[in-house]
Amino acid sequence: MWMLRIDMTDRSYKLEEVAERYQKLGGRGLTSTLIHDEVDPTCHPLGPNNKLVFSAGILSGTPSPSSSRISIGGKSPLTGGIKESNSGAGFAPALARMRVKAVVVEGQPAEKGAYWMVHLTWDGDKPAVEFLPAAEYVGEDLYVSYAKLYERFGKRVHVAGVGKAGELGYRNSGVAFDDMRHKPTRFSGRGGLGAVMASKGLKFVVLNSEGAPGVEYADKELFMQGAKKLRAALGEHALTKPQGALNTYGTCVLVNIINEAGAFPTRNFRTGRFAGAAKISGEAIFENNKQRMGKEIYNHACSPGCVIQCSNTIYAENGEEIVSCVEYESDWALGANCGIDDLDAIAKMVKLCNAYSLDTIETGDAIAVAMDSGLLEFGDAEGAIALIEQMGHGEPLGRILGGGTQATADAFGNPRSPAVKGQGMPAYEPRAIKGIGVTYATSTMGADHTAGYTIAPEIAGSGGKVDPLLADASKADLSRAFQKTTAMLDSTGHCLFISFAILDIPSGFEGMIEELNGMLGTHYTGDEAVAWGGEILKVERAFNEAAGLTPVDDRLPEFMKYEQLPPHDVVADVSDEIMDQVYGEL
Amino acid sequence: MWMLRIDMTDRSYKLEEVAERYQKLGGRGLTSTLIHDEVDPTCHPLGPNNKLVFSAGILSGTPSPSSSRISIGGKSPLTGGIKESNSGAGFAPALARMRVKAVVVEGQPAEKGAYWMVHLTWDGDKPAVEFLPAAEYVGEDLYVSYAKLYERFGKRVHVAGVGKAGELGYRNSGVAFDDMRHKPTRFSGRGGLGAVMASKGLKFVVLNSEGAPGVEYADKELFMQGAKKLRAALGEHALTKPQGALNTYGTCVLVNIINEAGAFPTRNFRTGRFAGAAKISGEAIFENNKQRMGKEIYNHACSPGCVIQCSNTIYAENGEEIVSCVEYESDWALGANCGIDDLDAIAKMVKLCNAYSLDTIETGDAIAVAMDSGLLEFGDAEGAIALIEQMGHGEPLGRILGGGTQATADAFGNPRSPAVKGQGMPAYEPRAIKGIGVTYATSTMGADHTAGYTIAPEIAGSGGKVDPLLADASKADLSRAFQKTTAMLDSTGHCLFISFAILDIPSGFEGMIEELNGMLGTHYTGDEAVAWGGEILKVERAFNEAAGLTPVDDRLPEFMKYEQLPPHDVVADVSDEIMDQVYGEL
């Protein structure tokens, strides 16, 4: 396998052997370790000394189910710390098939505002790169650009790209990957890595793996045995089986559940219940589609090899697709958090975010903060859509919101900023679900539900049932365990949604470990694999400490400590000591 | 003496005895110690748990020369750390005469956007407070408001107030004090304390000291002896004597000197020499005024009892006053740093900043960053004026710039942000004058020339001559010595401009120490007084550490490390180790 280094200063590249330290790594484990090893933690995220690393998961490119996650890493312009953001996309298996362990993008051109694309192909016996001008795509709607790219390079390529939000240097810009229909809808959205990519003058990576040799296994038999067990567990679990909860209602199945728990942040985290929740729920999406299309429509896969298939499509009254997909987080951020219960409007906003390469969570949070600051009324869907347009056009108000949740709150002098380490919170109220609050506060990534999804036990009862309102030290243990496991999973290339099956079905977990050992030639036990996740967290934490982050950054926002959240009338009351135990005992 | 606590939550107040810990403190020493003792370092600066403290210098209200400095302290919304910002104003001696050691403003009203003023008077035997509605002044030009206030309360009151920038929550808003002609031109400008004041619903403090008993001396004779020596030294030194450099050319006398040194930051710190420097110099101001007014016009005092009298007035062609005063820092920030060499335009901008209660340094830096980001051309004075108007009107672009230098750079994705701890740099290039760079980097206040003015030896040769380009460990010692002395001076109520006389004339320094001991009944030696300054720095540093600041925050911006500054083609090369020695050896 190779490390592919791309230097955007002079648009050169080189293939390197993979150093021993990196050979058993992939995905998040590799992006974070490389960033830790090679990037000055004090560098400016948009300056020449930051790097952007792409790495497919260890199991990407194999028949392992739901394993096509691509990780991107760098120093985040949003959090000032390390960032890994992953996405399910065909890009991951394609990169793996080319035996490129990581693409490391370095430097930046002297000329600002000039853009190129990297065309990565298989050159008979190794990967090869050419640099093509990308000026013609600058400022363009990504749906338009991707259609042009697929017209130009054929349907078998995969694309990573940045849109207007990245070009404008927004801290809430993501990197877009193509979905199964070649549209720019799968995002490494969080933390502003789109701006990092754009700051390097890199507009697209177009990857053509034709002719590539495919992945190598250390022990293919063991791998295949594990993959089979995991596939069986996923097919059996109520959440992940065909026509199960996720395949039917998508991730938006959570709307009613979290709302019922009083933990559905509404109108910039002013209450935990939204009167309009049912109207934007997964059930409503399924019923709407059935009514509008005259048949039951189950969801589809975001990436090759996914058996869970949870991506919905939102159809308009006239049967035309508005967008695919509206995830629970986007639905919530642009919906309930803005007081908006109009599903079609939410779908339009998601499409705009995709077109401009905006992170939907950060965008919804920022709009909600602007509403909370009096800029417009909660529930004003047209106003919210106009704001996203202003973001896409680089208008001054758009630049404010493009800075994300914290920047918007700061611009309006509003202390009610639901952010940790500068990153806006996702769709679970940390006052009402204490464990996820510990994850938000302490994650190396800023407020991030995917970093340690304690919702599984606290709400779904997966892996045992835990009281969400309990604020004792057990929540540090819970969050730590989930953060470690997640860092491991994010390295395998698996989707986090295999968690339910591996938590609840012992053979599922066993299968995943067998896959990993079969692939790498390792002999990890389950505990060792989780401990390996902990090592990744240590590397990330070391970077953050050197970047100037301290325990003060591992806290929930102050307003949540003195402002009671209805309906449970709870405040953020997990103590600082408990927060510090998460990493203190890593 | 009393501590006056004002609670803006319910608009109540109480007078307290001064605790022993605070009895020998005043000015910065007192504001910083109170903030350290009473404010949670992790609180939101604009939330209910921050406090705003006013304290006159220890010698304010006495015949000590140039001692009318009023300090304001709080947690800064700009730096996230502790902030003390002082101003020369009649407010200081008036507060001292009322024997109010500190005014501590706490809490905030539940109703946002409601404003009151505090009317502080002498009630026969003690200070008394009434809370008056201030709605009629909201959104108003401060020149208009102050004229109304003096009309309403009479010419003998003093006023502290915030304008539109504070109401809008801008991190570059200051607190305005009245000058000798009752205009809102003397600012505690830096660090956004205007927004803190406004966040408490406090629009003005109107202070009427009529009937107040005046200050008490421990040993009046010793005090008078010291004051006499200091006054003599000030009258003798070339910089501070009548019709000396400062009285003739004002602080803008530095323009040609710093430009000559290649350390005059030009066009957002792209070069150290400005072709238009002579046109905006102190000499040019003096000559312009002479030509326009038909006579030589020497400068006036900013506050009662000042013998240096360095405040200029800028007159238009038609003989009308444009503004008073244009300080060197404002002249530079809104001039050279924006590539503007039009003195009248600069004067207009200073007046606008005063009217809106904007910090001129932060405003000029932010405009220069916007220019550097392509928003408008360097040198575009009309464009710059329009930007300040947009700031005053709360327009989106104005809100971006109202966030200050770093926020503007972030909004435009520009790594060239000349800021430390979020605060924009003043008028000395740290690459070309290494000692001031050490002060910028390590000061508890963010980039602040007044925190440790090594320009005295590095450029003026005051207190010995030091090579400005030398980047060795001696610069840590130099900066530390100046930072300690400054913390002490900022507590006495003295203007920093006594530094030249006390550095160069031994009897001047001796006199200052005698004043202090005469006032307080202490027996400080000179060294002990400086050590006491060090104790103040420790308290500030402790607050900042608890607020989450680390040595990473004690660094110059990364771009200065790789971008050479003409004409000396120097980079920021004082090592991290040397930076860390400043406080490491405190």
Image (tube, coloured by chain):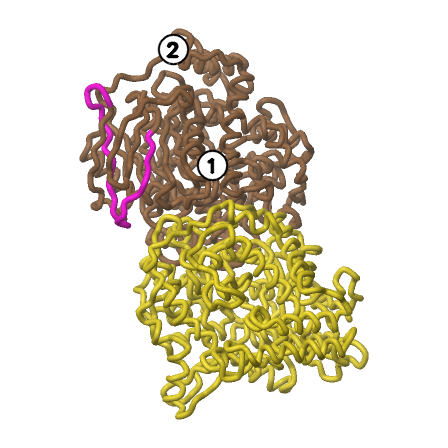
Chain colours: A yellow, B brown
Q: Is residue B341 visible?
A: no
Instruction: State the residue in front, A116 or B80.
Output: B80
Q: Quadrant of residue B303?
A: top left
Tell which circle, 1 or 2, labels the residue nearer the N-terminal end. Answer: 2
Q: Can you say whether A553 is above or below B107 in the image?
A: below
Q: Is residue A274 visible?
A: yes
Pointer 1 residue: B328
Residue shown at 38%/72% (left/top)? A256
Q: Magenta residues, as a range?
A: B103-126
From the top left corner, tell me how far across and down residue B287 is, in percent. Answer: 44, 34
Q: Can you say whether B228 is above or below A510 in the image?
A: above
Image quadrant for the N terminus of chain B? top left
From the top left corner, tell me how far across and down residue B289 is, in percent. Answer: 39, 35
- Whether discs 1 and 2 lie on one chain: the answer is yes
Say if the magenta span includes residue B105: yes
Residue shown at 28%/35% (left/top)? B205
Residue shown at 51%/48% (left/top)? A578
From the top left corner, tell me how far across and down residue A152 is, in percent. Answer: 62, 85
Of all residues shown, which one is farthest toward the bottom?
A294
Instruction: State the residue in front, A280 or A13.
Output: A280
Instruction: State the residue in front, A238 or B6.
Output: A238
Pointer 2 residue: B218
As shown in the figure, which amino acid type bears the numbered disc 2? Ala
Q: Can you say whether B384 is above or below B580 in the image?
A: below
Cα gap from disc 1 to disc 2, whole angstroms = 38 Å
